[in-house]
Image (spheres, helix red, strand yellow):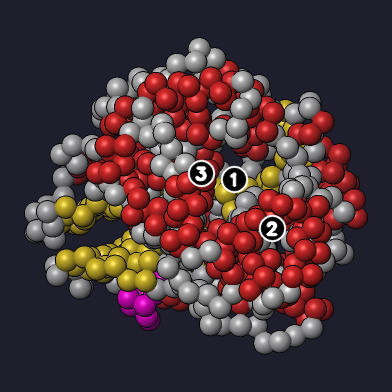
């Protein structure tokens, strides 16, 4: 894991070394092992290294090829090293440079893994940048007056703006959770863009052009196969996804709840280490818990560590005021998406670092990839009413939801966009009464709500819903916030269930094979039945942190007034209506926790980044 940044002046002027040094300083939390800064007239590159392999730690950054013509700053992990002819002791960076010499601009489509990089080709005066297929490594850029600036974070780019202004449309999209296609290319600051997942950008004297190098194929289907064959295929790809994320020369940590996703990853990782003959694996499990029965998952986690022989750590949730330390959290995460349990997350990451870990395995993405909500809509579309009722009831029992809720979601997916729009306006109150209607009109909020959530056409609703969940701009922003939180602690998060090979496989499966008898996450459950303890496989839910979450957020709004430290909140909300909403939330009315919490985090972000405290 690294911090990368750079400046390319296509106007021919030289890069200011002081700007490069300031950019490097802003990226310091992302890499503590090495610092690199290189400049050649109109191009400058910056690198901050957190090494997860000794091969990367042993080379000088930015990396240069033997000819001296190519320079690379790389933040990532390469998963198809063997396919690219990598030697066992060769760094990922060296492999990428050699691959570019062979494939040129088509390099990104040849790479498999999680990465963000910038490669300077001096012979062509060309900068090639790319972000991995699912956008698990951050990449922000600013293209202004013939100057291209990029960085792993948002803060290093702000000094280049004449004025820091929020992107009002993105702010309201967050408050309403109404993100749409194209938002994956935007940040919360007007003018600063994010490289979209599966996208490359090429900058040269002719300007800037973006290239989409990867997207899932909607017409690809797995050939009709029996249940056992499908499970075997899934199991094989899942094992490869876990194995790829174990590559590190330091101990690996794993977030282990008592749920299926993390238990499957930990159990599979332990088996992989055993198969490699490594003896006691450099893998340790970390479980967050509360003293409340609903949030205490230590017993199922112990079942996994007992079965695998791994060392387990239990980290108690810190019941602290989420406003304490919020300024520092917003600064580090560079956005308003902040977990109210940030004290607990910091404590957990500190415990991992104390165990000398540098890589963290997470089960994030399992709900998005494997919960087959669209399957029930396909049953309706294919006119299977009896099966629909039976499967919905079974899934609701697994999911811990009401049959009515699951069934209504399925029916809603069938509605055309215009019906969904009016349903939101009339039934859900979108836009809500607390919004600043003048701002809503100015940014065209109603047009946004009318727009479908993604543009890709899929043969089934199961595929449509899975891709919507995996590619959601909000989900991507949330993962970026998590990534920065780990980076501050000197850790790299890795997500086996968000491996692009696994995503492609699940999307290609016939919709009717996604679940059996309403069983939640059937594919994963069947694939790991031989390694996950039976009592964990039989669990039908996961730990519930709702009560401590609400307790923390209610503490934050205990005085019943809306904080407006930035002086900018009334640009987005009607303060009097928001304060009535806070009262309702404190009384326990409505599922308002995220609405309320984002009012606080947005205000702090506006204060820190827009009002100038960060500058």
**Circle 2 is placed at which residue position?**
407
Q: Which residue does the image show at 79% across and 58% down from the upper left?
A: 393
CA neighbours of label 3 inside 10 A, class few (<14), some (14 to 19), many (20+): few
Q: Which residues are magenta?
A: 100-108
CA neighbours of label 1 inside 10 A, class few (<14), some (14 to 19), many (20+): many
Marks 2, 1: nearer the viewer:
2
Element carrying mark 2: helix
Q: Say whether disc 3 or disc 2 marks the residue closer to the N-terminus.
A: 2
**Circle 3 is placed at which residue position?**
428
Picture disc at residue 294: none
Quadrant in which residue 267 is drawn: bottom right
Query: Percent from the top left, x then y, of residue 316?
Result: 72, 28
Relative placement, left or right, of 521 versus 71 is: right
Q: Nearer the viewer, residue 88 or 171?
A: 171
Element carrying mark 1: loop
Residue farthest to the front? Answer: 426
Does the CB distance between marks 1 and 3 fall below 8 Å?
A: no
Cα gap from disc 2 to disc 1, whole angstroms: 43 Å
Position of 23 relative to 277 (above/below)? above
Quadrant in which residue 61 is drawn: bottom left
Magenta run includes residue 107: yes
Q: Is residue 487 visible?
A: no
Query: Percent from the top left, x then y, of residue 365?
Result: 61, 55
Position of 489 relative to 124 (above/below)? above
Q: Which residue does the image show at 39% across and 59% down from the upper left?
A: 451
Position of 598 relative to 45 (above/below)? above
Q: Say whether disc 1 or disc 3 marks the residue closer to the N-terminus.
A: 1
Query: Percent from the top left, x then y, of residue 235?
Result: 74, 70
């Amino acid at each position: 894991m690294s911090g990368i940044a750079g400046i390319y002046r296509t106007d021919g002027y030289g890069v200011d070394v002081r700007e490069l040094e300031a950019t490097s300083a802003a990226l310091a939390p992302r890499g503590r092992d090495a610092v690199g800064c290189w400049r050649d007239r109109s191009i400058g590159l910056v690198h901050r290294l957190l090494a997860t392999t000794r091969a990367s730690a042993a080379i000088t950054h930015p990396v240069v090829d033997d000819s001296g013509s190519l320079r690379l700053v790389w933040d990532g992990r390469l998963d198809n090293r063997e396919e690219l002819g990598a030697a066992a002791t060769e760094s990922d960076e060296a492999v990428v440079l050699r691959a570019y010499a062979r494939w040129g601009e088509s390099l990104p489509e040849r790479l498999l893994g999680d990465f963000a990089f910038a490669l300077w080709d001096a012979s062509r005066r060309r900068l090639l940048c790319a972000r991995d297929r699912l956008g698990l490594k951050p990449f922000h850029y600013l293209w202004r007056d013939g100057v291209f600036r990029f960085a792993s974070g948002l803060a290093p780019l702000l000094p280049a703006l004449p004025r820091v202004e929020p992107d009002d449309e993105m702010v309201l999209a967050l408050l309403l959770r109404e993100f749409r296609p194209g938002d994956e290319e935007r940040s919360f600051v007007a003018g600063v863009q994010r490289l979209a997942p599966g996208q490359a950008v090429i900058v040269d004297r002719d300007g800037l052009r973006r290239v989409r190098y990867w997207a899932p194929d909607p017409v690809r289907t797995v050939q009709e196969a029996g249940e056992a064959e499908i499970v075997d295929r899934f199991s094989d790809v899942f094992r490869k996804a876990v194995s790829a994320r174990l590559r590190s020369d330091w101990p690996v940590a794993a977030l282990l709840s008592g749920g299926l996703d993390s238990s499957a990853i930990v159990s599979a990782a332990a088996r992989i280490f055993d198969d490699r003959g490594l003896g006691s694996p450099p893998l340790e499990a970390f479980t967050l818990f509360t003293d409340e029965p609903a949030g205490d998952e230590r017993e199922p986690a112990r079942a996994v560590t007992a079965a695998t022989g791994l060392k387990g750590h239990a980290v108690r949730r810190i019941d602290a005021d989420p406003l304490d330390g919020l300024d520092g959290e917003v600064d580090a995460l560079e956005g308003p998406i902040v977990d109210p349990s940030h004290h607990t997350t910091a404590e957990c990451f500190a415990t991992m670092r104390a165990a000398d870990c540098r890589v963290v395995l997470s089960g994030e993405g399992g709900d998005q990839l494997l919960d087959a909500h669209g399957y029930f809509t396909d049953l309706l579309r294919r006119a299977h009413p009896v099966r629909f009722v039976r499967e919905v009831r079974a899934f609701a029992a697994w999911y811990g939801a009401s049959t009515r809720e699951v069934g209504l979601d399925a029916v809603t997916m069938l509605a055309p966009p215009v019906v969904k729009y009016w349903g939101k306006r009339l039934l859900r109150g979108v836009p809500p009464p607390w919004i600043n209607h003048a701002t809503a009109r100015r940014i065209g909020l109603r047009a946004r709500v009318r727009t479908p959530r993604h543009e890709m056409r899929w043969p089934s609703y199961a595929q449509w819903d899975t891709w919507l969940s995996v590619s959601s701009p909000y989900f991507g922003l949330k993962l970026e916030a998590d990534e920065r939180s780990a980076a501050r602690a000197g850790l790299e998060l890795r997500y086996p269930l968000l491996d692009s090979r696994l995503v492609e496989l699940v999307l290609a499966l016939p919709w009717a094979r996604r679940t059996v008898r309403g069983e939640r996450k059937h594919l994963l459950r069947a694939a790991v039945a031989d390694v996950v303890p039976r009592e964990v496989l039989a669990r039908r839910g996961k730990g519930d942190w709702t009560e401590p979450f609400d307790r923390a957020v209610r503490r934050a709004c205990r005085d019943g007034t809306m904080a407006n430290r930035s002086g900018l909140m009334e640009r987005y909300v009607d303060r009097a209506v928001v304060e009535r909403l806070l009262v309702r939330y404190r009384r326990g009315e409505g599922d308002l926790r995220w609405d309320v919490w984002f009012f606080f985090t947005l205000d702090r972000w506006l204060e820190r980044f827009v009002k100038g405290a960060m500058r």
